[in-house]
Image (spheres, rainbow, N blue to C red):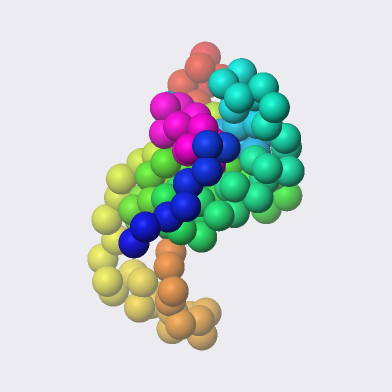
């Protein structure tokens, strides 16, 4: 599928793909502004929605925290530090029986699922 990637969208996608972190919209804006000084926050925000809807990036939401954006769009899980907010990818596989049990207990029909480990990262645990 072809996408219309404006210069602004290309810069935003570049910022996300080059980062080793899961950036917030504000962090993406600040990095994109270094590359394209005329870019506005509204453009970044709207471009993030476009890129997410196009399947080029993933959005990670955690309760009341700011969304973070991920270059990895395939199913994976995360660990988040409850002290500094560091967020990393982790690869886990779940037995189908676990998904079916969760569906049965909740009454929900599974659309997607994820695991998030909340705790202290190695740096904060020192």
Closer-to-camera residue (114/73): 73
Closer-to-camera residue (68/28): 28
Closer-to-camera residue (114/18): 18
Q: Looking at the picture, how far across and down is residue 22, in whole percent?
A: 51, 35
- Magenta stretch holds residue 18: yes
Q: Is residue 79 left or right of residue 91?
A: right
Q: Image quadrant for the N terminus?
A: bottom left
Q: Quadrant of residue 99?
A: bottom left
Instruction: Note whether 57 is above or below 86 in the view shown.
Output: below
* Principal secondary structure, stretch drawn in magenta: helix
Q: Looking at the picture, how far across and down is residue 84, in whole percent?
A: 62, 26
Residue at 68% across, 43% down: 43
Q: Is residue 7 left or right of residue 94?
A: right
* Span of residues in magenta: 9-19
Instruction: Note whether 74 is above or below 81 in the view shown.
Output: below
Q: Quadrant of residue 81?
A: top right
- Magenta stretch holds residue 22: no
Q: Is residue 51 left or right of residue 46?
A: left
Residue at 29% across, 61% down: 94
Q: Looking at the picture, how far across and down is residue 3, in whole percent?
A: 42, 55
Residue at 54% across, 29% down: 86
Residue at 52% across, 37% down: 7
The extreme top residue here reads 126
């Amino acid at each position: 599928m072809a996408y219309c990637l404006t210069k602004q969208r290309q810069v935003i996608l570049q910022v996300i793909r080059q980062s080793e972190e899961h950036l917030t919209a504000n962090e993406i804006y600040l990095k994109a502004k270094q590359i394209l000084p005329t870019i506005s926050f509204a453009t970044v925000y709207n471009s993030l929605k476009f890129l997410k809807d196009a399947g080029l990036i993933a959005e990670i939401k955690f309760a009341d925290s700011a969304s973070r954006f991920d270059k990895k769009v395939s199913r994976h899980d995360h660990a988040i530090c409850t002290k500094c907010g560091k967020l990393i990818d982790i690869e886990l596989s779940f037995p189908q029986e676990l998904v079916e049990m969760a569906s049965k207990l909740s009454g929900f029909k599974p659309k997607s699922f994820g695991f998030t480990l909340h705790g202290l990262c190695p740096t904060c645990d020192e």
